[in-house]
């Protein structure tokens, strides 16, 4: 297990509005952001980039010409689509490209979209995948909101009990590991989810990083699924860090 603190991902040279790494819960909270998955296909197809889906070269994504196309033309189009989606739905929707593993924005919870070289086909297929990824990301946010709601009343009742924080941490860590497959830079999304939860539990933002540094950083390896024992150990550290035990 690495003893090097997990580093923040470097910001790509693109519009920060389409980068999901620094989304706050207020920006993604499903209760604040209306979304109808039934109308999403029509919305996606109405956006200007949908009329200009680029043609992917044939062959495997690892072929040099396909890889180069994905890094250049494919990514430019995906960025344009992200700008259009965010313009319609709001910042929360930028997470549609936060894919599992080494995706456009790696280490995320989305399985439908990886990157242009892997996830595009003909225009209809591509737009279907974009829609699927957006709906999947939204579903993940709704699932997290439900899971947060299970534990927040318990913390309000007894915020000084480290065991309650520990149970919440163990639960959230387990679902994040499962959703991200512990692949790519998954630890960053783990920190984000924990930060969202801490904020909802009433802890001031300035406490989040020190608490997460103390309980999470250096505990996990990229591309390695943590054992149940390690998850429990981190959850215990989290509970003690939050309550000062």
Image (tube, helix red, strand yellow):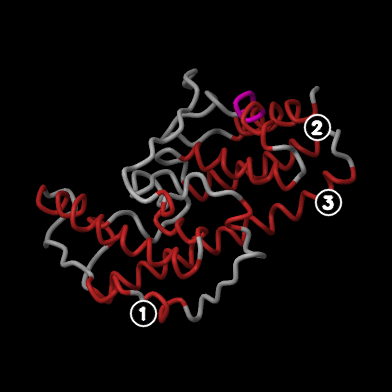
The front one of 205 and 105 is 205
Q: Which range of residues does the magenta coloring cover?
A: 211-215
Left or right, 25 with reference to 202 = left
Residue 213 magenta-highlighted:
yes
Q: In this view, does 159 lie to the left or right of 113?
A: right
Separation (CA) of disc 2 from disc 1: 50 Å
Pointer 2 or 1: first along the chain:
1
Could you tell me which residue is drawn at 44 percent across and 53 percent down? 17
Residue 25 numbered mark, or none: none
As measured in the structure, the alpha-carbon distance from the residue carrying label 3 to the one carrying label 2 is 15 Å
Question: Which mark lies nearer to you, 2 or 1?
Answer: 1
Viewport quadrant of the C terminus? top right
Residue neighbourhood size for the residue with mark 1, other residues' Cα within 10 Å, grouped as few (<14), some (14–19), many (≥20): few
Q: Nearer the viewer, residue 24 or 225?
A: 24
Q: In this view, does 200 lie above or below 1?
A: below
Q: Which of the 4 image quadrants contains residue 209?
A: top right
Q: Name the residue under label 1.
A: 46
Residues under numbered marks 2 and 1 in contact, where contact means CB atoms less than 8 Å apart: no
Residue sitting at x 42%, y 41%: 183
- Indicate the secondary structure of the residue bearing disc 3: helix
Measured from the top left, where is residue 162 in percent x and y? 80, 32
Q: Which of 181 and 135 is in front in this view?
A: 135
Quadrant in the rendering for residue 84: bottom left
Does residue 127 sit above or below 115 in this rendering?
Answer: below
Which numbered disc, 3 or 1, marks the residue closer to the eye? Answer: 1
Which numbered circle lies on residue 162? 2
Q: Say whether residue 160 is magenta.
A: no
Mark closest to the chain's N terminus, 3 or 1: 1
Q: Residue at x 51, y 63 (%)?
A: 90
Per the picture, the main secondary structure of the magenta-coloured stretch is: helix
- Mark 3, residue position: 153
Q: Earlier in the sequence, mark 3 or mark 2?
A: 3
């Amino acid at each position: 297990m690495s003893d090097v603190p997990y580093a923040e991902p470097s910001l790509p040279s693109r519009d920060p509005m389409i980068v999901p790494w620094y989304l706050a819960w207020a920006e993604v909270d499903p209760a604040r952001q209306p979304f109808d998955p039934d109308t999403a296909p029509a919305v996606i197809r109405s956006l200007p980039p949908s009329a200009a889906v680029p043609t992917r070269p044939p062959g495997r994504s690892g072929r040099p010409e396909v890889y180069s196309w994905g890094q250049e033309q494919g990514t430019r189009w995906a960025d344009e689509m992200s700008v259009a989606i965010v313009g319609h739905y709001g910042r929360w929707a930028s997470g549609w490209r936060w894919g599992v593993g080494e995706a456009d924005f790696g280490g995320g919870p989305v399985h439908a979209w990886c990157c242009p070289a892997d996830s595009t086909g003909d225009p209809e297929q591509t737009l279907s995948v974009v829609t699927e990824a957006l709906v999947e990301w939204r579903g993940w946010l709704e699932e997290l909101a439900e899971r947060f709601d299970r534990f927040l009343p318990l913390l309000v009742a007894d915020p000084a009990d480290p065991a309650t924080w520990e149970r919440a941490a163990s639960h959230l860590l387990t679902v994040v590991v499962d959703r991200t497959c512990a692949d790519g830079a998954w630890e960053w999304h783990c920190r984000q989810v924990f930060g969202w939860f801490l904020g909802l539990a009433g802890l001031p933002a300035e406490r989040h990083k020190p608490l997460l540094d103390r309980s999470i950083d250096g505990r996990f390896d990229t591309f390695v699924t943590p054992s149940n024992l390690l998850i429990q150990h981190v959850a215990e550290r989290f509970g003690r860090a939050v309550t000062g035990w």
